[in-house]
Amino acid sequence: MGLRALALALLLAGPAAADPLRIATWDPGLSRDGPGLLLRDITARDPQVLAAAQVIAHAAPDAILLTGLDWDLDNRALTAFAGLLAEQGHAMPHHHATQSNRGMATGVDLDGDGRAGQPRDAQGYGAFTGQAGLAVLSRLPIAGVTDHSATLWRDLPGNRMPESPHADIQRLSSTAHWDVALDTPAGPLHLLALAATPPAFEDRNPARNHDEVTFWLTHLPDAPFAILGNLNVDPQDGDGDPATLAALAAVTQDPRPRGAWQPPQTGPNAGQRGDPALDTAEYDRAPGNLRLDYVLPAQGLSVLASGVVWPAPDDPLAEAVALASHRRLVWVDLDLK
């Protein structure tokens, strides 16, 4: 075929189909008991850190929100971890992480236990600034980030905040709320990222969990989006309010990602009502395994596939998955044509 004929054939065929875009979220267990310890472990090539990099490289996301990675001022730990991913053959050169509310001191007795300066007195639970923060890693450029983490809880329309003498300083985000715009070939895709407080441990937490998760309903971009992260609420088991997820269903779709294997439904799992294939967190105590981590694309987006990285015990990846974290990576493939 001559060059002119080939060019005509390509023109008639139209533009090539865009590759699917894989979006993921995971708590990789990359948090430590003090500042600087994560960087130490990454530099020393700690087996747990290497296992986390192996799991992400296996899933091969185009962009991933990590919901349990210690933040430092110069992002040295995040940069070093991105280097490990590149060594695993999955380079993600674009990343974003800023100080979250975890461990951010307030100077007051926020939880009302008579002692100030404790982890529960921070804007979000944490023993030090940046503990278990958020980070985004991406193969695609990041076009911009809008950070809503400083929003006061009382300022959220329709909030469930209990009465508090510290309403003038209490932020809504226990970790962070970021709108991260990815620069995709089809245009921007907004990752609406969060890690919500569990609806347990403190009297205020059920209300805060609900308001953190539903925050995005009043801050949706006028562009394609996906709400993702550790929502810390299971639709059928655990302490969460199912109405929290039902509210998101008004604007999102749930691909219901499934794992390839589920542990036996015995012991703490025996009384569960939810589908175990949807679980993303493994617990050896009541209430058992839970679905806590989500990628929820906007209604109207084309979902091609989805999954939870929970391999069978005889799978070569199983050892790395178990070593890295008690959470499981969740991914969704989108067609943004």
Image (cartoon, grey):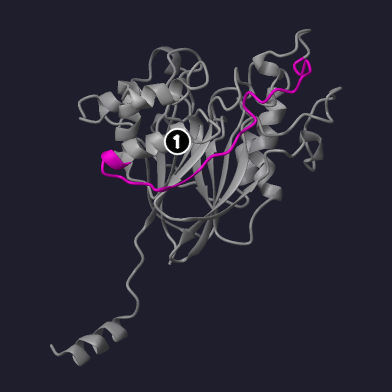
Using the rendered image of the protein, determine whether residue 168 is visible from the camera's viewpoint: yes
- Towards the viewer: 3 or 321: 3
Q: Residue most toward the front? A: 74
Q: Give the image quarter of residue 57.
A: top left
81 lies left or right of 73: left
Left or right placement of residue 157 versus residue 138 in this view: right
Residue 147 or residue 36, whichever sits in front = 36
Looking at the image, which residue is at 60% across and 39% down?
A: 245
**Residue 106 colored magenta?**
yes
Residue drawn 86% across and 22% down?
Answer: 165
What is the magenta range?
86-111
Q: Residue at x 50, y 14 (%)?
A: 286
Can you see residue 326? no
Location of mark 1 (residue)? 78
Please identify the residue farthest to the top as the structure is shown.
114
Q: Nearer the viewer, residue 122 or 234?
A: 122
* 220 sits to left or right of 184: right
